[in-house]
Image (cartoon, coloured by chain):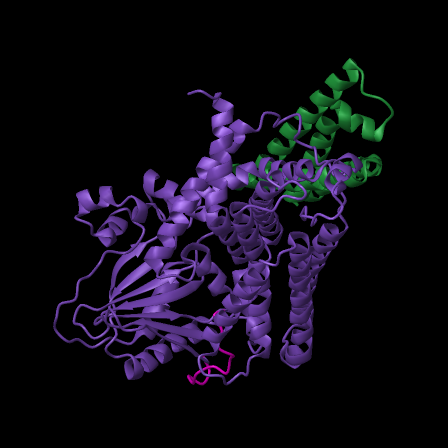
Amino acid sequence: MKQGFRQSMAWMHTWSGLVVGWVLFAVFVTGTASYYRAEISRWMQPELRREAAITPETLAASADLAVAHLQAHAGGARMWFVTLPTPERPLVELFWRNRPGTPPGHVLLDPQSGAPAEMRATRGGDFFYRFHFELNLPPLWGRWIVGICAMVMLVALVSGIVTHRRIFSDFFTLRRDKAAQRGWLDAHNVSGVLALPFHLMITYTGVVTLAIMYMPWGVTAAYRGDQQAFFAETGQVTRNRPPAGEPGTLAPVGPMVAKALATIPEPLERLSILNPRDANSTVVAVFEEPHGLSHQHPQVAFAGTSGTVVEVLSGGLRPAAKTFTTMVGLHEAHFAGAALRGLFFLCGLLGCAMVGSGLVLWTVARLPKSGVAAGFGWRLVHTLNLGTIAGLPAGIAAYLLANRLLPLDLAGRAEREVWVFFGAWIAVAVAGAWPAPRRAWRGALALVAALFVAVVLADVATARALWDDPAWFLGFDAALLALAAGFASISYKVARFAAPRRARRAADAPAAAPQMGRA
Amino acid sequence: MTLLVGLGLSFLGLAALCLSMARHHQAVWPGPPDRQRVLALRAAGWVLIALSLVAAIRLDGWNFGPVDWLGSLIGAGLVLIVVQSYRPRALLWMVPAAAAVAVAAALGSLA
């Protein structure tokens, strides 16, 4: 090695970070938003009315009603999933998987009437959640791309720690009175070092979540590739009951729900019904996780035709499986109350800041000299940076705006919202190729701020009459306004930033030369 | 409650470590700290951070304690860095405020 170890690591950090940075930024932003997935979904369906409590009788009746609907509309499906009503979301959500190659079915029912619920169609916060690890691509593609990027992120994190020679002495340093490059480097260091335990944890556990997919060889060798058998043997799911191939009749599920509720003290979350018209059908009642770090849903499995309990899964994982579920639990942070969730969200924002400032730093450190035209590489990185860092938030704001402004009876409404999300993102990315970089940044960030303000205005104008808890909706809108204020102040700073006098004089020397931005 | 105790103690600890450095000391008081002061601030900083970990584990157990501790350490660190970068002299009233919050929250969670 001709160079020193630290220089090699610096090279590694720069290029590994740049190559995956754009995908990582999107993954960090949507992942951070996913901490408030349920809240985003609630905001996007203001028609929802919450209830004080759901009695066991209502749960049993809802399950019967759900199965009646599925028998009538999805008799040929291989699997039925029934999400039961909760006080926060008193709806019955049905999802069914048909033959491979045909699209799955989905419907929301009102548990009182059994009719489809009167709600605007939307993918809500689930869209961000799925985007976080699938990028809205076919699942296999998306998960591989995100996984590879996360693995490279681990490389970038470790090489970044080696590269940073003053971790402790610069721990509290955020200089704003020096050259732009110094300021961006400080911002990158502070956001990276301060939340380093979070960054390492979230990246590592993120890869672990899908480890069986990325490294299937153990399961391939020991279980002949039967992942269900592996998960069942490690106690994470109930044992698979293959179809008998003979027709059978599903027993009433109401009594099964009552029996399951008597077995497990946690709230009941959903029912999975496998091979519903087979003689060997299975009903699995899946409960919410007990309070703890481990992501582990208690489950009770019933033989579908007789309604007898065939298996109860509740705790009792072996150390390896427990390690896995604890890592998944840490990643998802379902255990976190409001305050701790806020801190996780803050750490997620620091992650976004770390990736974003790193991307910007690449262009700032390589700013073309005054009077020299920027090379293709610099322009490409700059355009992708702007397209991602301003484009994605613009897409998110446009997605929320579409939720309030698209006609409620529009066919394929939920998918149209997603189109608006990508449309706004692409539009900002294309406009970001504007030849004056600083003005492009300033305009794009101001646009993001304006879009978030527009979301709040549209919410108050169109949905105010629907709010079941005005304080809650106003709180959500206040959070959106805070985001808008953040983007507006960055836009203002980009416009106002002046390099220290020494640097500026050098840059200004050929007065006629076009000025490059220093964002 | 645990988070408030953690936030207060980690803020105090990190502030002491921060002020033990010449650059940050000069932003609040005239001149760099002398040797004795550096050592005293450093010792106080590490003791307070250790104390915040002990408090988190005592209040929330071994499962959630470390998670709460790291969360509050990062949150307090962010507040401290922003404050000492924009308004370093605000530390003069924020330090007693953090101490008051930590003590009040600790008493509250014992009661």
A284 w.r.t. A111: above or below: above
Give residue B37's quadrant in the image.
top right
Is A118 covered by the magenta stretch? yes
Q: Say whether residue A9 is visible.
A: yes
Give residue A251's quadrant in the image.
bottom left
Magenta stretch, main secondary structure class: loop
* Relative depth, front residue between A299 and A197: A197
Where residue A65 appears, x then y in whole percent?
37, 80
**Chain corresponding to purple in the figure:** A
Total marks in image: 0
Q: Residue at position x 64%, y 42% from top?
A: B2
* Relative depth, front residue between A281 and A476: A476
Residue furthest to the right: B30
Q: Chain B is drawn in which colour?
A: green
Q: Residue at position x 55%, y 67% from top?
A: A424
Is A519 covered by the magenta stretch? no
A112 w.r.t. A518: above or below: below
In the shown orientation, is residue A221 left or right of residue A315? left
Q: Say whether residue B59 is visible.
A: no
Where residue A42 appears, x then y in whole percent?
55, 69
Q: Residue at position x 46%, y 39% from top?
A: A16
Q: Residue at position x 70%, y 20% from top?
A: B43
Residue range of the region highlighted in magenta in the rendering:
A111-123
In the shown orientation, is residue A500 left or right of residue A123? right
Where residue A185 appears, x then y in whole percent?
63, 37
A162 w.r.t. A368: above or below: above
* Relative depth, front residue between A95 and A281: A95
Name the quadrant of the N terminus of chain A. Answer: top left
